[in-house]
Amino acid sequence: MATHNSPPSTEGQRIAANDAADSLDIEPTLSSHFIVYLRDYLLDKKLPLAVLDDVAHIIEDIDDSSQLPLSQIGELFNRVADLAGDEYLGLEIGKRYHFESAGMIILLMLSAPSVEQGILALERYDKHFDSAINIDFKISGDHAVFSVNLLNPKHVKTDHINEYLLVFLVQALSKATRKPMPCKEVWFEHASDKDLAPLQEIFPCPIKMAQSCNRIVFDAGYLKEKFYTSNSGLFEIMGQMMKAYSFSHNGGANFLEILSREIVRLSNEGPPSLDEVATALNISSRTLRRRLAEQGYSFAEVKKQARENQARFYLNHTNLTLSEIAFELGYSELSAFSRAFRSWTGVSPQSFRDDEN
């Protein structure tokens, strides 16, 4: 399973206007709603909002299309946690989530008929709002596994965001079903020496830290539980809006970023075809070809650039080994990745990493 995917960035927002062969140092983004979560936390705690002054303009005119680099949002989470003296900031935000501040993707999820349909909607569409997040959902026998991973630059501390993501999911599903989520095991990516008792209250099951991903394993029977928040009309309308929003409302740059992300995500199964990528994006192959033509790109060009951009990001911003990077990009051998990277840049991956750092 790929745990990291190709993300957009402030530089990436200009990709449609730039030469596809240009080297971009891509940084993943999160929806600006993460800033709203911090605002609501500060208001609840009666703490000053001044800590968010540099993003105040986003809060004043919140828009689902607004995105901020993961590094900036991670730094703001840490800043607010320090201000409040709260080492469980992510847990507190997830536990006391303000549903009146929910964005489109949460409204879609909670209008679904059941837990399974809600999670599938989240997995399918969240990629269009949070490029820093990869969701993977699997059912194995009587267990369901929900994994959520952050494409995390090595300098960004995301403990609070990791905890928020899993706590929010459990709280939202429990509220929508009026039944506690039957968790079997919970993983967090970050290491921690703090008291896990507050987390244990949310997750009454074994909790493991410093794991390969953030993950909840739960009883698959829970997937059939109906949502008391279900609204079939809203679910259908929101689904239609998601499709239109994802590939029409946003500019061509965003479309290419999403496309690049899916290409890299699918590469672990081997080089994906245009038809496979279109299916993953929930659009027709004809629509994908048309959108590429409108932007002046071929599928082969985007596929090549997606891998190069992803490789550059991993080398610049993560501590992954060269072999791990090769695997993430779908290469079975480090030597094959090294040859490809040299053909893109003229230098070896190790030389590129040494020069950048």
Image (spheres, rainbow, N blue to C red):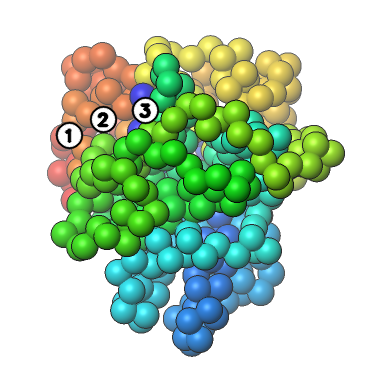
Counting from the top left corner in percent of width and height, residue 82 is at: 32, 77
Instruction: State if disc 3 and disc 2 touch (CB < 8 Å).
Output: no
> Which amino acid is tagged 2?
Ile
Counting from the top left corner in percent of width and height, residue 342 is at: 25, 25
- Circle on res. 2: 3
Say if 195 sits above or below 13 in the image: below
SS under mark 2:
helix
Q: In the rendered view, does 195 fall on the left or right side of 252?
A: left
Q: In the rendered view, does 316 fall on the left or right side of 42?
A: left
* Nearer-the-camera pick, 181 or 279: 181
Q: Earlier in the sequence, mark 2 or mark 3?
A: 3
Q: For residue 161, which quarter of the picture?
A: bottom left
Counting from the top left corner in percent of width and height, residue 235 is at: 76, 38
> Which residue is at 60% across, 48% downward?
178
Q: Earlier in the sequence, mark 3 or mark 1?
A: 3
Instruction: State if disc 1 and disc 2 touch (CB < 8 Å).
Output: yes
Give the residue at mark 2: 325
SS under mark 1:
loop
Give the residue at mark 1: 321
> Which residue is at 37% across, 19% downward?
268
Badge 1 density bin: few <14, some 14–19, many ≥20, Cα 10 Å: few
> Which amino acid is tagged 3?
Ala
Q: In the rendered view, does 240 fall on the left or right side of 110?
A: right
Q: CA distance from mark 3 to mark 1?
A: 15 Å
> Which amino acid is tagged 1?
Thr
> Which residue is at 31% across, 54% downward?
200
